[in-house]
Image (cartoon, grey):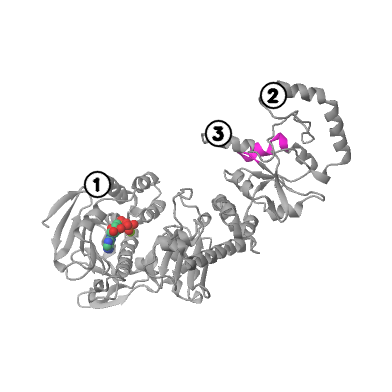
Amino acid sequence: MSKQTLSFQAEVKQLLHLVTHSLYSNKEIFLRELISNASDACDKLRFEALDHAEFYEDAPNLDVRILVDKSARTLTIRDNGIGMSAQEAIDHLGTIAKSGTKDFMGRLSGDQQKDAQLIGQFGVGFYSGYIVADRITVESRRAGLKPEEGVRWSSEGTGDFEVDAITKPTRGTDIVLHLREGEDEFLSAWKVRSIVNKYSDHISLPILMQKEEWDAEKGEHVTLDTWDTVNQAAALWTRSKSDITQEQYDDFYKQISHDQDAPLAHTHNRVEGRSEYTQLLYVPAKAPYDLWNRDKKGGLKLYVKRVFIMDDAEALLPSYLRFVKGVVDSADLPLNVSREILQESRDVKAIREGCTKRVLSMLEDLAKHEDQAKRDQYAAFWTEFGSVLKEGIGEDFANRERLAKLFRFASTAVDDGATQSVSLADYVDRMKEGQEGIYVITADTVTAAKNSPQLELFKKKGIEVLLLTDRVDEWLLSHLHDFEGKPLHNVTKGAVDLGSLQDEAEKKQAEEAAEHLKPLLERLKTALSDRVKDVRVTTRLVDSPACLVTEDGEISGHLARLLKQAGQ
Ligand code: ADP
Ligand code: MG
């Protein structure tokens, strides 16, 4: 291959411009992104070497080295991972294969803190190097290729990049950042170490830097030829709980989730028995922007005996828990496990059940915690993820009771009826003497629900009604028929039977009225014959003259409106 100059894909150009101009106040994240790429490259090597032991060549110990060169004003991130062939360098560093790029650019908010997180989420981390560098040179050689088959890729990050063949004796990749004017702070080994500590302490790969010594004669720090490890280099989940601080747990979460906020809760366990594995699971505090994306995969990373196998292992948790982030490290699965095998595996089934139970316990602990602050966290969780959790009622039969207990609803019994804070258990505790069922109303909004004529009688009698206004609620009701033996009644459906809550006098009055009003009912029925099925006398209204209801077992008026909106 002779030297060639190629042009960046148009999208990349745009992206580069945005990245360098909009992330400036958070510039140190470039180091996190480049170290994370180096770590990915080592994971890939380990994985490919399962079938190709020769890929290790004579360097089986994988690590990342960071070199500072003050006179050349460069900072180099070097790994001995999988490396890139010339074609891979062209493809991976000059184009953006992932479809999410447009989305990414549309999402940049101008809030640099937030945008800096997006960069990692969208897999465009390499380009963050241009925040501090006006030229990046990449020298790489893929494992398994000959030393002469190395590649040098170089670009100022504007329009073009160059690629050239080089001889590179060692496998892996050097990312050389030529620092911009004014970015000399990244030439300070001390500064670089502190950034590595902040962002990459939990990378399970050793990150090495050269020692420095104060040279009194020269009056400056000189770099020595000895290397030391800057990070802890032990995968967090393999360490014992008692050795891990809350802050370390939080940092690890931020690293794997690209979320800037600390998580709400975590659970970390080594499970032994039928299936042996370690789980470290987190519940985030905020919903990601794509929570409602149907294709969104789960948030768990799968490792087998500490070897990284795959991201987004959706088989490890049911889809209604897709917001959970974390790591599962299995001792039983084969290293060459594929997504297809995962779907079938009995070990995976055990892991999935185990993880589901743990997540539910984590939520239960928050929900009924003695500490008000924790309960508030549950309320916040519910606001962010409640609708997703509701999907579980149809998806996870085994846990439906535990799930139903975690649900929260708006209610006529709460002053500020708009917040979803009432549990079914709260409702049952407050049920009136003689009340047999749980009354709910479905509507588009809480205001519509509260002002519905169908609630008049309930208001008059002081009977609590839960106000269900989420899109999934109709669907929820079609799966959740009762709670602790108490049937759920949608008051927009059929005749309301208040059972023994209705006094005899009222019933009698209604029967008499029905008799007395028969001729009127007949005339109404004839007049509306092609529009309604039946016209009845009701006791449910107090002030309004009439209301519409649907038949039991039929779709409710609210659902019919939703379907119509959706064009069905
Ligand atoms: P992502 O890491 O999410 O894929 P990046 O922009 O960070 O996105 O990196 C783009 C691609 O460049 C990577 O997917 C990988 O194929 C390649 N790459 C980057 N750094 C390295 C490296 N150190 N070793 C091997 N490949 C790399
Ligand atoms: Mg990356």
Residue depicted at x 60% and y 59%: 399
* Magenta extent: 442-454
Residue 443: in magenta span: yes
Look at mark 1 in the image and give the residue it sits on: 9
Residue depicted at x 32% and y 54%: 124
Residue depicted at x 20% and y 54%: 155
3D distance between C-alphas at marks 1 and 3: 43 Å
Mark 2 residue element:
loop
N-terminal label among 2 and 1: 1
Look at mark 2 in the image and give the residue it sits on: 529
Q: Is residue 64 visible?
A: yes
Mark 1 residue element:
loop
Rendering quadrant holding ligand 1: bottom left
Is the C-beta separation of discs 2 and 1 under 8 Å? no
Task: Answer with left or right where residue 13 lies relative to residue 540.
Answer: left
Q: Identity of the amino acid at label 2? A: Ser
3 or 2: mark nearer the eye: 2
Mark 3 residue element:
helix
N-terminal label among 3 and 2: 2
3D distance between C-alphas at marks 2 and 1: 65 Å
1 or 3: mark nearer the eye: 3
Q: Identity of the amino acid at label 1? A: Gln
Q: Is residue 71 above or below residue 554?
A: below
Q: Position of residue 194 (x, y in %)?
A: 35, 68
Label 2: few (<14), some (14–19) or many (≥20) C-alpha neighbours in 10 Å: few
2 or 1: mark nearer the eye: 2
Q: Identity of the amino acid at label 3? A: Lys
Q: How many marks?
A: 3
The residue carrying mark 2 has its beta carbon less than 8 Å from ligand 1: no
